[in-house]
Image (tube, rainbow, N blue to C red):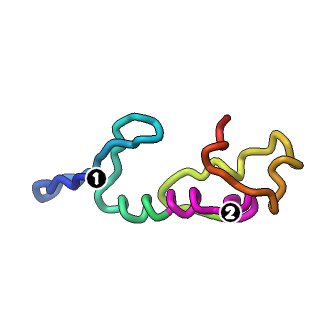
Amino acid sequence: MINKPSPAGTRSLVYGHAELHDCLAIADGETATAEAREIVAIASARTWGEARGIAPRHVWNPVPEIEDDPDEHDDAASFDINQVGR
């Protein structure tokens, strides 16, 4: 990621290429590090219950909203972030 300094009184943005979605990702420079940590925490979860339990402050965690098949997404079931949204 590249952090561009900003003149006094303006906002600092951090941007870079998001490989998974092949797009430009932009974050507020003040919260970018915390956002990245939250994304890594969600992606690193080993079970659906662990992923659901993450309550980020800066990014959206889609996992708690997935209720299509409770048996498939049981708290103890193995979690793979690449399966979210499919």
**27, above or below 68, in the image:** below
Expressed as whole percent of the image width and height from the top left, the position of residue 10 reads 18, 53
Expressed as whole percent of the image width and height from the top left, the position of residue 17 reads 33, 42
Q: Earlier in the sequence, mark 2 or mark 1?
A: 1
> Is residue 50 found inside the magenta-colored segment of the image?
yes
Give left or right: position of 28 versus 76. left
Q: Which residues are magenta?
A: 38-53
Going 55% across and 63% down the picture, which residue do you hit? 41
Going 26% across and 51% down the picture, which residue do you hit? 13
Question: SS at mark 2?
Answer: loop
Query: What amino acid is labelled 2 in the image?
Result: Arg
Expressed as whole percent of the image width and height from the top left, the position of residue 46 reads 68, 63
Q: Which mark is residue 46?
A: 2
> Around disc 1, counting alpha carbons within 10 Å, would you say few (fewer than 14), some (14 to 19), or many (20 or more)?
few
Majority secondary structure in the magenta region: helix
Instruction: Name the residue carrying label 1.
Output: 1
Expressed as whole percent of the image width and height from the top left, the position of residue 84 reads 65, 43
**23, above or below 82, in the image:** above
Q: Which mark is residue 85?
A: none
